[in-house]
Image (cartoon, grey):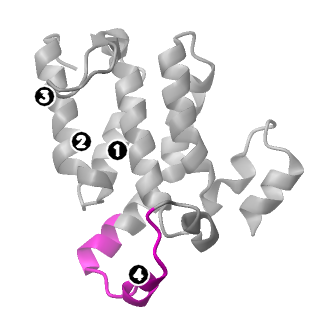
Amino acid sequence: MDDDPEARSRALAALDMAVLHQGSLYTVTAPAALFVAAILDHPMGRAEQAGNFPWDEESPRSLRAALLAWLAQVAESAAYGEDPERDRANWDWEPWRDATRGERDPDELAALAACRAIRPALYDSVEPHLSALDPHVREAALGAAVPLLSSPLLVDQAPGWIDGSERAWQER
């Protein structure tokens, strides 16, 4: 929440590189995600934020949009492996990986369980931003809401725009 845009960029880069590196979940990911969710409404969230890294080519967006985009990555990582049919549609799914799926590090499994458990709290923080005036914030909120709503813990939270056939798909 620093006034210095470069300090905010460094903090966003740390989230990307150390807390959720290439989609990997760590024991620090869930607490960091809860903190990010808690600060979404902070007034500094309206501050314009360039990319997290010098090589980013994104147009400037608000800090809030950047934080929502990061929460979307957390939500996608937490959902991965939860629905084998959905994951098979993923371009990098390979059948032979199923044989090693059970051989995961205990810390990795604990981090995954923690990130899955906090999805209702994350959704509660993300949902109000689905109707934000800023189109970047709305888009980032939607990007976070969709993987969050794939959680079995949130089936009843699915908003009215999900019709019965899609809800039935989620409940499988």
Residue in the image at 70% along x and 46% along y: 157
Q: Does 34 appear above or below 167?
A: above
N-terminal-most mark, 1 or 4: 1
Q: Which residues are magenta?
A: 92-111
- Helix, strand or loop at label 4? It is helix
- Disc 3 is placed on an element classified as helix
Q: Which mark is residue 78?
A: none
Q: Nearer the viewer, mark 1 or mark 4?
A: 4
Label 3 crowd bin: few (<14), some (14–19), many (20+), radius 10 Å:
some
Three-letter amino acid code at the position of disc 4: Arg
> Is residue 88 a member of the stretch shown in magenta?
no
Q: Secondary structure at mark 2?
A: helix
For the question of whether residue 39 can be seen, the reply is no
Q: Is residue 115 above or below residue 11?
A: below
**Which image quadrant is residue 111 in?**
bottom left
- Numbered circle sitting on residue 97: 4
Q: Is residue 102 magenta?
A: yes
Residue bearing mark 3: 10
Q: Which residue is mark 2?
A: 16
What secondary structure is marked by label 1?
Answer: helix
Residue position for label 1: 33
* Residue 115 place in picture, x, y as percent: 40, 58
Identify residue type, mark 2: Asp
